[in-house]
Image (cartoon, grey):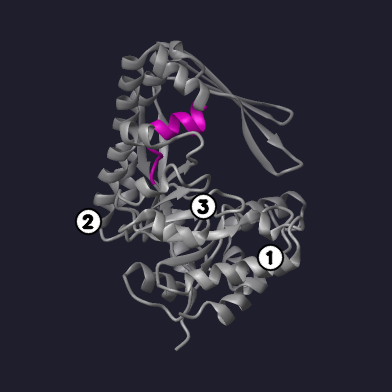
Amino acid sequence: MTMTPRERVLTLLRGGRPDQVPWFGDLDYLATAMIGRGQRPADFKQSAAYLDWHRELGLGFYLQGYFPFHTIIENCRITEWREGHDKHRKIETPRGVLHDCWTWLPESFTEGPTEHLLKTAADLPAYQFLHANTRYEPDYAFGAARQSELGDIGVMLAYLPKSPFMQVVALDAGIIATVEMMSDAPEHFEETLDVVRASHDQAAAISLTSPSEVLMIPENLSSESVGPALFERFMRDYQQTWTARIRTAGKFSCMHLDGTLKGLLRQECTVGFDFIEALTPAPVGDLAVEDWAKFCGDAKTIFWGGMPGAYFSPHVSEAEFERFTRATLAVMRREPRYVLGVADQVPPNAVVSRLHRVRELVAECGVY
């Protein structure tokens, strides 16, 4: 019997063997570019048409950037303004002023921080005050509506907050300033992480009772910047605490690891996640798909990824795309431990016909 994308991935997550390797992908980046070019309406990603697009492509749906809580900052004065492509934010607290700037890059349809909120250890008191005065309220409406629209195309996934350390590294300071703060004011830095943890735990508890079937800790990790020592010191406890609570709640857990793998994949497989998502293999990453299971030893974590986003761009030849996809499926069909996924996202210049082609190749080469 032929399974649907939803049946395939749920069967795998429950320890069974689906009819073929599940094929899921993140189309958010491509959709953002299409909206920016005027090819799709502004609300496309929130609409039922977005799910229909996945059905048309034969691609399982799971990612929608959904945080099931509303963040409320109190006792601070927040000012936001735009200057061209720059988005500024100033947060005034009784213990200091924080400012950041994120810049939109129209050529690549993305944004990034050009000035971080945290710059030196002198900013830690204000940052502590900010998180100590942040509260959260459930915001389940979008998730409930999306759940009712999903049908057979996929699963509903929501985010917890990042671990406090990755909140600082990935969003609010960057790795260089983080290391400098750890060196200049180690006790104050760790105290700050404790304050952020108390805040994030509140939001995580709200995520736990959301309608979503799958909950992600969206760490956005790469072992080029965070290796085993920092992981063990600052991240493991948060991840283990919440994966255990997610399992007790009857939901599936995952985390996002889309950079280099050798420094962290083995460690992350011991945390308790049901799957690790967006795994980027060689030649784009540093560990070939056929080496993932052996590298991680006895861990039973499901591997989700394997198709670098670059392979959907015209910079990779059709012949190499075909060869690589077939070779990846030859590994993944050996045992029901893999979800073929895009690592990390389908790019704005994607050759869309290749998404159709993957569906055909999974039917041809992805049967166990």
Indicate the secondary structure of the residue bearing disc 1. Answer: helix
Residue located beneath label 3 in the image: 287
Residue drawn at (47%, 39%) of the image: 223
Identify residue type, mark 3.
Answer: Leu
Identify residue type, mark 1.
Answer: Phe
**Extent of the magenta region:** 160-174
Residue 248: mark in rendering: 2
Crowding around mark 2 (Cα neighbors within 10 Å: few <14, some 14 to 19, many 20+) is: few
Instruction: Locate the C terminus by quadrant.
Output: bottom left
Q: At which x and y percent is residue 101?
A: 61, 25
Indicate left or right for 321 with 173 as reference.
right
The magenta stretch spans residue 183 = no
Residue drawn at (67%, 59%) of the image: 311
Nearer-N-terminus badge (1/3): 3
Residue 52 in view: no
- For discs 1 and 3, the disc positioned in front in the rendered view: 3
Q: At which x and y percent is residue 265?
A: 41, 48
The residue lying toward the viewer, choosing from 79 and 26, is 26
Residue located beneath label 1 in the image: 321
- For discs 2 and 1, the disc positioned in front in the rendered view: 1
Indicate the secondary structure of the residue bearing disc 3. Answer: loop
